[in-house]
Image (cartoon, rainbow, N blue to C red):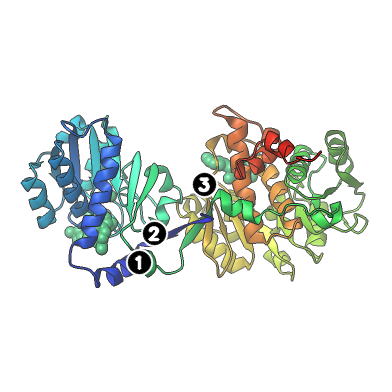
Amino acid sequence: MKMIAAYSADQIRSAEQALMARLPEGTLMLRAASGLAAACADLLPKVYGSRVVLLVGSGDNGGDALYAGAVLARRGARVEAVLAGERTHQAGLHALQEAGGVVAGEDAVAAAELIVDGLVGIGASGALREPYARLAEAANAAAGLVVAVDVPSGVDASSGRVAGAAVRAALTVTMGARKTGLLVDPGAGFAGRIELVDIGLDAYLPGPDVTALTRAGVAGRLPRPGHETDKYRRGVVGIAAGSDQYTGAAVLAVGGALRAGAGMVRYAGPGRPAAQVRARWPEAVITELDEPSIDGVGRVQAWVVGPGLGTGRWARELVARVLASDVPVLVDADGLNLVAKGVALLRRTGPVLITPHAGELARLTGAGRDEIEAGRLAHVRAAAAELGVTVLLKGSTTVVAEEGSPVRVNGTGTPWLAAGGTGDVLSGIAGSLLAQGLSGYDAGSCGAYLHGLAARIAACGAPLTAAEVAEAVPAAIRALSGESALDHARELTDW
Ligand SMILES: NC(=O)C1=CN([C@@H]2O[C@H](COP(=O)(O)OP(=O)(O)OC[C@H]3O[C@@H](n4cnc5c(N)ncnc54)[C@H](OP(=O)(O)O)[C@@H]3O)[C@@H](O)[C@H]2O)[C@@H](O)CC1
Ligand SMILES: Nc1ncnc2c1ncn2[C@@H]1O[C@H](COP(=O)(O)OP(=O)(O)O)[C@@H](O)[C@H]1O
Ligand SMILES: [K+]
């Protein structure tokens, strides 16, 4: 599988209606409930005798929970349903009671081994109301495992927004297709592991709302050097970064670029960062700049401009000169702070990939930082449309938007990445991929994938430094195909 696809609530609803019209009534809910019951049974050490509590809202999400509860009750579980809505799915409740399940009060939640969240699904709107919000908090406070039906209640299925209380699930069993809000933070952080139940919806689904590359998808997009290639044909990336004050950003961006497959890395910058880059990376070709100009640097296939550059006149002139070139340009960090003062700088014929975190995007678009973090998808889409460039918004889930394509979500990151300098490494990696001929959309999404995977490899559950993320990029590339260093030695069968 090369791609994971996810859909908005409206897309799912239309597909479900089209499918339902061809099937006897209730078929889809029974398919959903049987998948849900199987997933719950897998989580329990033993179904017989286990204590299961269903949180049941007024809609079909509650219906799924009730029918699944009936299956578990028939297998000997002690199943109690807490009815939260003014209405309850009557056929589902009847099925549960027939199977031996009972209706219980809210106190039952604390004693449950397994809590099934059937409060609301794709039919929810706005923050959870009472008593739903209280029940969500009770489930989060309880010792039992929590399984969310379709989406964790309180998470907006289409955006991942969380407006108030929300269920924090160990497992989300989602029906027919993944919902967008399960892949994007903050919602993704509430979903736990995601299990997809096939209810026969695929043929009725439109193009996805968002996608995520899998390891096969990334592997298929990374160029491998051909037999007779040379360093220029593999792609040369130019890095215009660093200042007398911020030398480390230059070192880290060059490090990321060197590790991500470009044939050569050219560095251009003032004396102090240039000396640091020279000392750390003898592989890089260095041009010490007296003037803010790239005329004497030599040909590159893509530029990275901005990390650690400062925001003075010298830096502004350098950013303008880089953007005036005809090759793809990645703009990051101070480059973005400079562009924020006049977005006309981004108007050029060559491709542009910008890599802001929420604070930098806030400066570019005027939206609030918190608002961007709460609604990452809407903001990244709007920025791509407004600015006419590819936008990679960094953060706990990184999202890449380009007009006319579904937003790509990256889920490989780890919170250990929240460390100074890791963004500089990402700009080097993605710039290296741009120079190798990937589009801004692919360079951004493959770059984020490799960066996150490298961080996981480097961290192994402990703190990491940005330099270690760059060091681990080759291991991440190898891990894409499950190859080891030894496998590559074995390729030499005749030698
Ligand atoms: N369709 C299909 O084929 C299939 C659907 N399936 C399943 O159905 C689910 C969708 O079911 P759905 O459409 O009935 O909506 P659902 O999410 O249960 O809740 C709606 C009710 O909740 C309430 N409510 C809303 N917001 C609220 C809030 N903030 N706080 C509190 N309450 C709130 C509101 O009630 P009201 O306020 O109107 O009384 C509304 O009527 C879907 O996620 C999947 O699990 C599967 O079985 C596969 C086949
Ligand atoms: N909680 C998190 N989970 C996963 N990745 C994160 C998290 N916080 C930050 N990151 C990643 O770490 C990097 C930080 O980049 P940035 O904010 O530019 O830092 P710096 O400017 O110090 O280099 C980004 O790639 C971002 O996506
Ligand atoms: K739910």
Nearer-N-terminus badge (2/1) = 1
* Disc on the earlier residue, 1 or 3: 1
Above or below residue 343? Residue 53 is above
- Sequence-wise, which precedes: disc 3 or disc 2? 2
Farthest residue, direction front: 494
Query: Residue 10: which numbered mark, if any?
Result: 1
Instruction: Name the residue type under label 1.
Output: Asp
Q: Residue at x 52, y 64 (%)?
A: 406
Type of residue at label 2?
Answer: Ser
The C terminus is located in which quarter? top right
The residue to which callout 3 is attached is 411
Give the side of residue 300 with respect to residue 101, left or right: right
Residue 477 position within the rendered picture, expressed as x and y whole percent measured from the top left:
66, 43
Q: Nearer the viewer, residue 206 or 291?
A: 206
Judging from the image, what secondary structure is the residue with disc 3 in?
loop
Crowding near the residue tagged with mark 2, few <14, some 14–19, many ≥20 C-alpha atoms within 10 Å:
many
Q: Is residue 131 visible?
A: no
The local crowd at label 1, few if under 14, some if 14 to 19, many if 20 or more residues have their Cα within 10 Å, is few
> Which residue is situated farthest in the top direction here?
462
Answer yes or no: do the residues labelled 1 and 3 have beta carbons within 8 Å? Answer: no
Q: Residue at x 90, y 49 (%)?
A: 289
Question: How far from the left and from the top, in percent, is residue 254?
Answer: 78, 43
Gap in Å between the C-alphas at discs 2 and 1?
A: 8 Å
Q: Which residue is mark 2?
A: 158
**Does the residue at mark 2 contact the one at mark 1 (Cβ under 8 Å)?**
yes
| Quarter where residue 454 is shown | top right
